[in-house]
Image (cartoon, grey):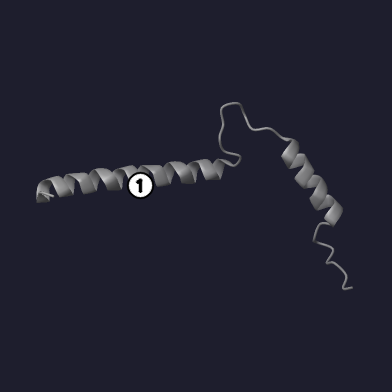
Amino acid sequence: MPRRPSFLPSLETLEQEALDRSAQTTPKGSQFDHPTAKYVFIAVLVVTVLAHVIAGIAFAIVGF
């Protein structure tokens, strides 16, 4: 079996880090475990709403 490079964490270390992360609770009222996921969700939501509003205005002008 090849030796693991010294800069990589051991399996035990990775397992302990995963257990520590799973023990942490998110703040009350939060639906997102990761702040980046929250920002991506908000950005996609804003783009979707804007696209629908712009399309609604365009279709109203064209007459569909």
- Please rate how many residues cluster around mark 1, counting C-alpha atoms within 10 Å: few if below 14, some from 14 to 19, many from 20: few
Choose top left, top right, bottom left or bottom right for residue 43: top left
SS assignment at label 1: helix
- Camera-side residue of 9 and 22: 22
Question: Is 10 drawn above or below residue 52 in the view shown?
Answer: below
Choose top left, top right, bottom left or bottom right for residue 52: top left
Residue shown at 83% from the left, 51% from the top: 13
Is 47 positioned to the left or the right of 23 in the image? left
Q: Residue furthest front?
A: 64
Q: Amino acid at mark 1?
A: Val
Residue shown at 49% from the left, 42% from the top: 39
User: Where is residue 57 shown, x and y percent of the image?
Assistant: 18, 44
Residue holding disc 1 = 47
User: Where is residue 40 shown, x and y percent of the image?
Assistant: 48, 46
Is 24 positioned to the left or the right of 39 in the image? right
Q: Residue furthest top?
A: 28
| On-image quarter of the N terminus | bottom right
Residue shown at 80% from the left, 61% from the top: 7
User: Where is residue 46 shown, x and y percent of the image?
Assistant: 37, 42
Choose top left, top right, bottom left or bottom right for residue 32: top right
User: Where is residue 6 shown, x and y percent of the image?
Assistant: 84, 63
Residue shown at 56% from the left, 35% from the top: 31
